[in-house]
Amino acid sequence: MTSNTYSNDEAVEVLGAPTPEQPDQAAGTAKDPEDWVTGDEPMTGAQRSYLDTLAREAGEQLPADLSKAEASEHIDRLQQATGRGA
């Protein structure tokens, strides 16, 4: 059986908690959509549906053939424009 106790000298990779070597994660910084490995793939169904809702609320029309990264950038922008952004 594996122990959940680690010495202070042992570097352990964990999920959900930033380590001191990862200050961007500690600040909650997300990866830029342009840097996504799958960013060039077509947007997901969820992105398409949400983007359609946001674009209608903002009175905008967008191309239906956006990539995941492009859709994410439009979602971020339209969330701010419609007040839906967090």
Image (spheres, rainbow, N blue to C red):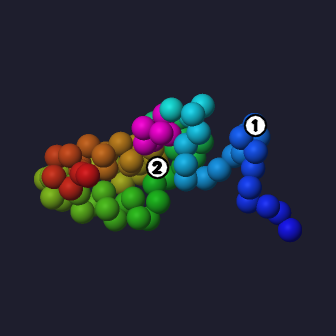
* Element on which disc 2 rests: helix
Task: Check residue 28 for magenta coloring.
Answer: yes
Residue 53 appears left or right of 73: left
Badge count = 2
Residue occupying the far right of the picture: 1
* Residue 3 percent location from the top left of the image: 79, 61
Neighbour class for label 1 at 10 Å: few (<14), some, many (≥20)? Answer: few
Examine the residues drawn in magenta and state their main secondary structure.
loop
Residue beneath label 2, please?
68
Q: Compared to 78, does 54 lie above or below?
A: below
Task: Check residue 42 for magenta coloring.
Answer: no
Quarter where residue 55 is shown: bottom left
Pair 1/2: label in front: 1
* Residue 81 percent location from the top left of the image: 16, 46
Under mark 1, the amino acid is Asp
Magenta-drawn segment: 24-31
Residue beneath label 1, please?
9
Q: Compared to 74, does 46 lie above or below?
A: below
Specify the quadrant that holds the N terminus.
Answer: bottom right
Residue occupying the far bottom of the picture: 1
Which residue sits at x=39%, y=59%? 47
Q: Is residue 75 visible?
A: yes
Neighbour class for label 2 at 10 Å: few (<14), some, many (≥20)? Answer: many
Q: Residue 57: give its label.
A: none
Q: Mark 1 or mark 2: which comes first in sequence?
A: 1
* Residue 84 percent location from the top left of the image: 21, 56
Q: Front-most of 52 and 25?
A: 25
* Element on which disc 1 rests: loop
Residue 39 appears left or right of 79: right
Which residue sits at x=71%, y=40%? 8
